[in-house]
Image: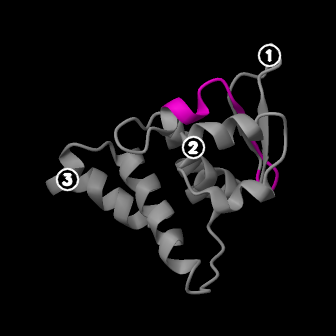
C-alpha cells in the first residue's frame, strides 16, 4: 500500500486523488482494506509505518469521514507501537489501545471500541455514533 501511495504522489494525483490529499487517500485505503479482510477472516499484520501514516492523517481528514472532528481534543495513545498524538497537557481525555483499533474506531467502525480504554473512549463512542 505504501508503494501505491508513493506512486500517487510521484505521478501527480490522477482522478479522484486530485481532490484528496495523499495522506487521506492512504488512510482511506488502509481502512477499507481492513473492512474487507476482517469479515472474511483474513488476518493481516499492518506494518508499523502504515499505521503511523494512517494515525497521522486522522487529525487532518475532513470531508466525508470527518475524523478531524472526531479526534479534536482527544489524546490517542497506541499501546502496540510507539505512537501518541493530541494534547498531553490539561487532562485531555485519553484513548489507549492497539493502533489498528484506534484507526478503525476513529473512522467510524465501532467494533473495535471494546479494545480501547481510557477516559476518552465514551466521548469517542458518542462522536462516531452521532
**How far separated are the C-alphas under marks 3 and 2?**
25 Å
Check residue 26 in the rendering and tell me which mark sits there, or answer none. Answer: none
Residue 92 occupies which quadrant of the picture?
Answer: top right
Any part of residue 98 in sight: no
Is 38 situated above or below 93? below
Q: Secondary structure at mark 2?
A: helix
Query: Mark 2: few, some, or many residues within 10 Å (few <14, many ≥20)?
Result: some
x, y percentage for residue 9?
29, 51
Check residue 16 in the rendering and tell me which mark sits there, or answer none. Answer: 3
What residue sits right under mark 2 in the picture? 128
x, y percentage for residue 126?
64, 38
**How far separated are the C-alphas under marks 1 and 2?**
24 Å
What residue sits right under mark 1 in the picture? 89
Query: Depth check: 58 or 45 in front?
Result: 58
Q: Nearer the viewer, mark 1 or mark 2?
A: 2
> Magenta region: which residues?
69-81
Amino acid at each position: 500500500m505504501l508503494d501505491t501511495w508513493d506512486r500517487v504522489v510521484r505521478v501527480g494525483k490522477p482522478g479522484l486523488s486530485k481532490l484528496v490529499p495523499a495522506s487521506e487517500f492512504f488512510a482511506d485505503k488502509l481502512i477499507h482494506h481492513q473492512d474487507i479482510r476482517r469479515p472474511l477472516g483474513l488476518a493481516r499484520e499492518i506494518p508499523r509505518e502504515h499505521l503511523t501514516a494512517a494515525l497521522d492523517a486522522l487529525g487532518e481528514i475532513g470531508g466525508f469521514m470527518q475524523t478531524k472532528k472526531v479526534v479534536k481534543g482527544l489524546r490517542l495513545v497506541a499501546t502496540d507501537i510507539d505512537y501518541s498524538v493530541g494534547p498531553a497537557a490539561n487532562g485531555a481525555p485519553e484513548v489507549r489501545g492497539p493502533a489498528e483499533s484506534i484507526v478503525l474506531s476513529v473512522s467510524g467502525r465501532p467494533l473495535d471500541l471494546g479494545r480501547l480504554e481510557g477516559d476518552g473512549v465514551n466521548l469517542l463512542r458518542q462522536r462516531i455514533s452521532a
